[in-house]
Amino acid sequence: MRLSTRGRYAVMALTEMARRGPGGAKEAPMTLAEIAQAQMLSVAYLEQLFGRLRRAGLVRSARGPGGGYRLGRPAVAITIAEIVEAVDDTIAGGPEAADMPDMPPDQRDLWRELGEQVRLFLSAISLQDVVDGRTMGRAVPVPGGAASPGED
């Protein structure tokens, strides 16, 4: 399962900003060109994303010479789920998938629950966790779930 390009690019961009500092008012803002170059992303695409991220309060803009963007809150207070949701991304398997007309009724709960599990997982990871490389080993087995191959 993968996030869409919109969600991945938004996470990549804010991760780049978080690597540069805590996002405080005294920190120099980053331009979209700097972010695009560092992450090999399109400036035009970032412009679209940053409008949404700004409206969600995840980034603040500074105008004029030396302007750009700063994080709206400390990286530790921004979750990956917030970033994904801010760019109007859908999490694969979410309610939208479950309500598709061609979805067999016996599978709707499965896809709805999968989307909720992904959302909960991304809600437990902060932007600072990504910067610090603290994302591995977070998957938690579901109690009562099926045994892994080879387990008895």
Image (cartoon, rainbow, N blue to C red):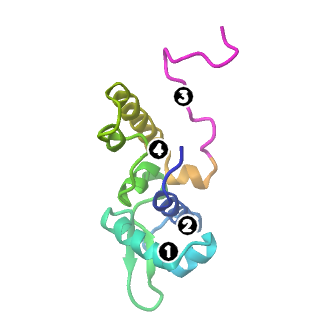
Q: Give how far apart the Cα atoms at labels 2 and 3 are.
A: 31 Å
Is 92 part of what is drawn in magenta? no
- Identify the residue shown where x is 47% and y is 44%: 122
- Identify the residue shown where x is 47% and y is 39%: 121
The prevailing secondary structure element of the residues shown in magenta is loop
Which numbered disc flags the more N-terminal residue, 2 or 4? 2
Q: Which residue is mark 2?
A: 21
Most foreground residue, 74 or 139: 139
Q: Can you say which quadrant of the picture contains the C terminus?
A: top right
Q: Can you say which quadrant of the picture contains the N terminus?
A: top right
Q: Quadrant of residue 113?
A: top left
Q: Which residue is mark 4?
A: 122
Q: Give how far apart the Cα atoms at labels 2 and 1 are.
A: 7 Å
Which numbered disc flags the more N-terminal residue, 2 or 1? 2
Whether pointer 2 and pointer 1 mark residues with C-beta atoms closer than 8 Å, the reply is yes
Is 142 part of what is drawn in magenta? yes
Horizontal and vertical percent position of residue 149: 67, 18
- Residues rendered magenta in the picture: 134-152
Which numbered disc flags the more N-terminal residue, 3 or 4? 4
Q: Give how far apart the Cα atoms at labels 3 and 4 are.
A: 13 Å
Placement of 103 over or under 129, stated as above or below: above
Label 3, secondary structure: give it: loop
Q: Give how far apart the Cα atoms at labels 1 and 3 are.
A: 37 Å
Q: Which residue is mark 1?
A: 27
Q: Which mark is residue 60?
A: none
Residue 21 in the figure: left or right of residue 118: right
